[in-house]
Amino acid sequence: MIVSMENTTTSAIDKKLNQLRDQHGVVTLGRVLTLVILAQAGHSEAALEAANFASHEHPCRILVHVAHSQAESTRLDAQLRMGGDAGASEVIVLHGYGELAAPTETLFSALLLPDAPIVAWWPHEVPPPSPHTSSIARIAHRRITDAARSDDAYETLAELSDRYVPGDTDLAWTRVTNWRIQLAAVLDQAEPAPVREVVVEGCGRSPSVVLLGTWLGTRLDAEVTFVNNPGTRRLDKVTLVRDDGEIVLERPGRSVAMLRQPGQPDQQIAMPVRDLSACIAEELRRLDPDEVYGEVLTTGLRDVRVARIVDTTGELTPGAARFLAAHGGGRPAPELPPGAPPGDAPEPVADAPAKPSPAPAADPAGAAASVPSSGEEQA
């Protein structure tokens, strides 16, 4: 059931909800949280579809604010969805124009479920610090962003690191959950041996690659090489270089990964690409702070040792170049032969080979690209 209301107020919406519940017997006793989605005009349905899917596991009230032009006259239109049109939840879509195009705490306060946790989700951008976003963040127990919407993964992660408070999380981290599970299981079963280098291969615009490489490098106390390949924003391969050989986990397609270990036959592992619905469902399973993500985003990005960033696209993003410089990346220049002029020394910054390095490839670096569609970021 869908009910539209034009030029309305939140108090009128609340009264209409009560009326519909009395008429149709819909109750809110089973709702476990309020999910607030801060969307952009024309792009809200994909986020709403993912939230509806997740509501079957986490019954909730979904409040969607769709920001329209601030130049239009101030008004609030609403759409109420209940029953089969709202999954296992009830959905309130608020279309804000003029002054109401910027979501605020006061706009949502009358519609929040009493005594229920609040989760705020920005599906289309990492919001800049502002009084409006701060007011929403203040009342939320969890705050979900998506760094994959940025063209420069390093720059966005650095910004998130500076602003991090417990309760923040990002879908770029959620997308690598299966990779982290598999790699941790492999290392638990492998013979003890130090990991000398971690090589992560994928698209340089994917923050998932940066986060996974940082997590592995800091936890294993190893240098990290990021190999940036052009193409879809995705994570392709992870190689753990050890004295007894290399452990390689590679997913060439979208559903099956190949695991190669020294002295063992190759294994195929079911590891499908995680869609937006699965990521949101996972984030709603826990409302306490994700301490591992917090450590990776703050101390991890600061302490990780970067061996190099191999850029097969021929261009580093500004954020990647700063990240490399800050972490001492780049192999030291080899000694020059006697009599060679100093200008012949290669730059000790990022490699830009004519073809991908034989070592597994991974994430960070260049190529300006448009913001991905909702299903483009893969991990």
Image: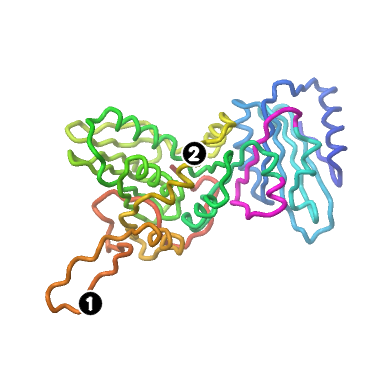
Left or right: where does residue 93 sit relative to residue 283?
A: right
Find residue 174 and name its label. Answer: 2
Q: What type is the residue that disc 2 sits on? A: Thr
Image coordinates of residue 147 in percent, x first then y, are 53, 50
Determine which residue is flagged by label 1: 342
Image coordinates of residue 340 in percent, x first then y, are 16, 77
Left or right: where does residue 299 sit relative to residue 309?
A: right
Residue 304 visible somewhere in the drawing: yes
160 relative to 271, above or below: below
Q: Which residues are magenta?
A: 113-135
Image coordinates of residue 12 in percent, x first then y, are 87, 37
The residue at 36%/33% (across/down) is: 182
Q: Secondary structure at mark 2?
A: helix
Occupied quadrant, residue 343: bottom left
Occupied quadrant, residue 312: bottom left
Q: Secondary structure at mark 1?
A: helix
The residue at 50%/52% (across/down) is: 157
Task: Please check the rendered image and state whether residue 130 is part of the magenta-colored stretch, yes or no.
Answer: yes
Task: Please check the rendered image and state whether residue 134 is part of the magenta-colored stretch, yes or no.
Answer: yes
Specify the quadrant that holds the C terminus: top left
How far apart are labels 1 and 2 at the CA level? 47 Å
